[in-house]
Image: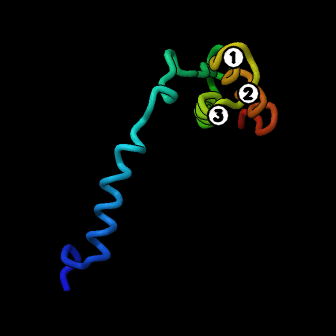
Amino acid sequence: MHALTDPRCLSLLLFLALIAPANAPGDWLLMDPPPDVDKYHHGHSATLTCCLATSANMLAGAGYGTGSSVQEQADGIYLQLVDHFGTDE
């Protein structure tokens, strides 16, 4: 039996087609501006902390951290990550 004529495959395709619009991004995903940690601002320009900055941006965007803005949250998370993991100099 061909995969596209298999009733289980057709059921799965129908299910995915019905739930796809429900998983579309909503207004809660929009941030203007999104957090963007600047490692140069923190004095880490010659270090390999890009992955820490990216992680801090993602965590702050998800609502973690403390601060009055999402940028302050990201900066705080970045400094905590650098304090924990170091700058690999």
Measured from the top left, where is residue 56 in percent x and y? 65, 31
Mark 1, secondary structure of its residue: helix
- Per the image, the residue denoted by label 3 is 59
Q: Is residue 48 visible?
A: no
- Per the image, the residue denoted by label 2 is 65
Report the disc number at residue 15.
Answer: none
Tell me if mark 2 has few (under 14), some (14-19) or many (20+) residues whose alpha carbon lies within 10 angstroms of its own: many
Measured from the top left, where is residue 18 in percent x and y? 33, 53
- Per the image, the residue denoted by label 1 is 72
Tag 3: residue type? Answer: Leu
Tag 2: residue type? Answer: Gly
| Residue at 60%, 37% in the rendered image | 51
Query: Circles 2 and 1: CB distance less than 8 Å?
Result: yes
Give the image quarter of residue 10: bottom left
Q: Is residue 20 visible?
A: yes
Measured from the top left, where is residue 49 in percent x and y? 64, 32
| Residue at 49%, 16% in the rendered image | 32
Query: Circles 2 and 3: CB distance less than 8 Å?
Result: yes
Measured from the top left, where is residue 26 in percent x and y? 44, 31
Quarter holding the N terminus is bottom left
Mark 3, secondary structure of its residue: helix
| Residue at 29%, 61% in the rendered image | 14
Give the image quarter of residue 74: top right
**Which colouring convention does the figure follow?**
rainbow
**Residue 67 left/right relative to 33:** right
Mark 2, secondary structure of its residue: loop
